[in-house]
Image: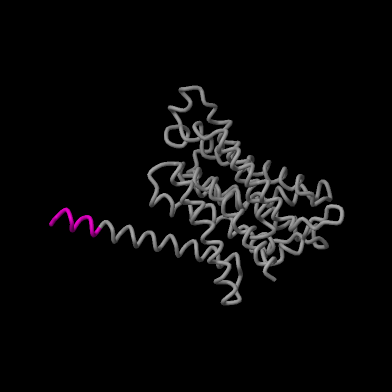
Amino acid sequence: MMAHELWILAIAALTSISCAIVGVLLVLRRMAMLGDAISHSVLLGLVVAFLLTESRSITIMLAGAALTGLATAWLTQVLNQYGKLQEDASMGIIFTLFFAVAVILISLYTGQVDLDQECVLYGEIAFAPFDTIIMGDSDIGPRTFWVLAIVTLLNLMFLWIGYYRLKAMTFNASFAASIGIQVGLWNYALMALVATTTAASFEAVGVILVVALIVIPANTAFLLARSLHGMLIYAIGFGVLSSITGYYLARYFDASISASVAVMAGVFLALVLVAKKAKIRVDRKTVTS
C-alpha cells in the first residue's frame, strides 16, 4: 500500500513539474488560454493516431498529440491574422471544433477500446500504479511514471538549451527577432511541448488537472517572483505541493485525486493573494506613519 501511494505521489509530482515549466512560459507570454486550447484539442490527435495505426503506442500517441497541438497554434494564428478575429475567439473556435470532432470519432469508432472522453477529462491516477512495465523478470514500475519522467526530462532539456532565447522572446519578442532568434520556430517548439506534456498526462490525471497545473501554479508564482528563474522555481514548488496536499485531501474525503489537486492549487493561489494584499496594506501604513 505504501509503494502504491508513493507511485501516485511521484506521478503527480512529475505532472506538476512538466506542466509548471510550460505553464510559466505561457503565462508570461499571456498565452495561458492557448495552453487550455491545446490541452483539449490534442484529443483529436490521439484519436486519429489510434484510428490510423490501431495502436496505443506512446510514441504514436505523443506524435499525434504534438501535430494537433501545432495545428491548433497555427490555425489560431491564421484566424487571428487573416480572419481578423480576436485571438481568444480564434482559440475558442479551433479547440472546441477539434474537441467535438474527437468526441464524435470516439463514440463512433472506439467503443471497444479503453479510449473514452471521461478518461481523458478526469483521468484516474489511483489506477496508474497497476499498469506496470516488466523487463525480464523485474517490475520497474508504472508505465505512466516512466512516460512522464521522459516528458519532464524533455521539458527540462528544452528549458536548459533555450533558456536565454525563451527569456528574450518572453519579455520582448521584437528584440529577440532583431538579434537573430527564430521566434516562430521556438514558439512552435513550445506548442509541441505543451501538446506532448498534455498527452502524456491524459490517462493518469485527465485534461482538467493538466489545465489547472499549467495555469494555476504559474500564476501563483507570478505574484511572488521577480525573475523568470524564480518564477519557474515557485511554480514547480506550488505544483508539487498542490499534488501532495491534494492527494491527502482526496484520501481523507474519499474524493477524486485529480480534482482535489486542482482545488489545492486554487487554495494556494488564494492564500498568496490574501497574503500579498495584507502585505500591501502593512506597507502603506508604514509609509503613511
At 38% from the left and 44% from the top, the residue drawn is: 226
Side (left or right) of 28 relative to 185: left
Q: Give x and y (percent) for residue 60.
A: 77, 45
At 60% from the left and 73% from the top, the residue drawn is: 251
Figure colour scheme: one colour
Give the quarter of the figure containing the C terminus: bottom left
Q: Give x and y (percent) for residue 75.
A: 60, 40
Give the quarter of the figure containing the N terminus: bottom right
Relative to 61, residue 203 above or below = below
Determine which quarter of the picture holds residue 189.
Answer: top right
What residue occupies the far left of the structure in this picture? 289
User: The magenta stretch spans which residues?
Assistant: 281-289
Side (left or right) of 140 relative to 208: right
Q: Give x and y (percent) for residue 61.
A: 74, 48
Determine which quarter of the picture holds residue 194.
Answer: top right
Report the magenta stretch's main SS: helix
At 80% from the left and 50% from the top, the residue drawn is: 51
Q: Assess whether residue 282 is covered by the magenta stretch.
A: yes
Q: Assess whether residue 243 is covered by the magenta stretch.
A: no
Determine which quarter of the picture holds residue 117.
Answer: bottom right
What residue occupies the far right of the structure in this picture? 136
Side (left or right) of 226 relative to 265: left
Q: 23 or 100, which lies in front?
A: 23
Q: Give x and y (percent) for residue 175.
A: 43, 27
Q: 241 or 205, which lies in front?
A: 241
